[in-house]
Amino acid sequence: MAHTLPPLPYAYDALEPYISQEIMVLHHTKHHQTYVNALNAAEASYAKSSTPKERIALQAALKFNGGGHINHSLFWKNLAPSAAVNKGTGGVLKDGPLKTAIIESFGTLEKLQKEFNATTAAIQGSGWGWLGVNPSTKRLEITTTANQDPLLSHAPIIGVDIWEHAFYLQYKNVKADYLTAIWNVINFEEAELRYAEAVGTSKL
């Protein structure tokens, strides 16, 4: 079954002014589509391979492009039009289990944002910043992954793409401004659903 590019749950300009339409079009239709195409090609080659050496040679392509597809599919749902500019509910953390867990682990949402942004900005090269649930402790933790590696150590709640293609056209080399801005379009309603599933209280 071939992988396909998932449609965005909002228009390409819906995250403005925090993420520009130009970035969203390129990021979704070019970058994510490339990961999908390359993943399908790698899986087709794997299916045709007949030796362990051939299969091992394909592992890097499967990991990179598979991770790119997984991460971006999650990322689009992670975002929502911003309440700060009266477009939607993005950036609004309502009272509930996720907010309680954030306060327990970080003290306040603002402290979480500060620690998350510092940790994510410190990634050398390309990668992803994550807020995830530790499966052992069920507590929220901040972690990172390199390149397009998917988050396997935690259940992902919020993921932020820190590859330059995610922000450079708008924020140039100033990662800090991008990381500050993106909290205005974080979809905390989606994060709440993921949190409930991760800690075993999901009613889905």
Image: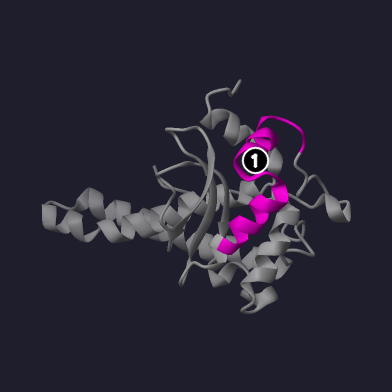
Q: Which residue is drawn at 66% across and 35% down?
A: 98
The percent coordinates of residue 161 (x first, y second) are 56, 60
Q: Residue at x 58, y 51 (%)?
A: 75
Whether the magenta-drawn stretch holds residue 3 is answered as no
Q: Type of residue at label 1?
A: Ile
The percent coordinates of residue 126 (x first, y second) are 47, 68
Kindly give the residue lying farthest to the right in the view shown.
86
Quadrant where the image shows the C terminus: top right
Q: Which residue is drawn at 68% across and 75% down?
A: 171
Given residues 77 and 101, the one toward you in this image is 101
Kindly give the residue lying farthest to the top in the view shown.
203
Quadrant where the image shows the N terminus: top left
Residue 58 location, quadrant: bottom left
Relative to 19, residue 150 above or below: above
The percent coordinates of residue 185 (x first, y second) are 73, 53
Q: What element carries label 1?
A: helix
Disc 1 crowd rating (10 Å Cα; few below 14, some 14-19, many 20+) is some
Seen in the image, is 129 located left or right of residue 193?
Answer: left
Q: Which residue is drawn at 46% across and 33% down?
A: 137
Given residues 105 and 138, the one toward you in this image is 105
Seen in the image, is 155 located left or right of residue 111?
Answer: left
- The magenta-colored residue range is 94-118
Q: Which colour scheme is used?
A: one colour
Q: Name the residue under label 1.
A: 102
Relative to 118, residue 93 above or below: above
Given residues 122 and 39, the one toward you in this image is 122
By secondary structure, the bulk of the magenta-drawn segment is best described as helix
Residue 61 location, quadrant: bottom left
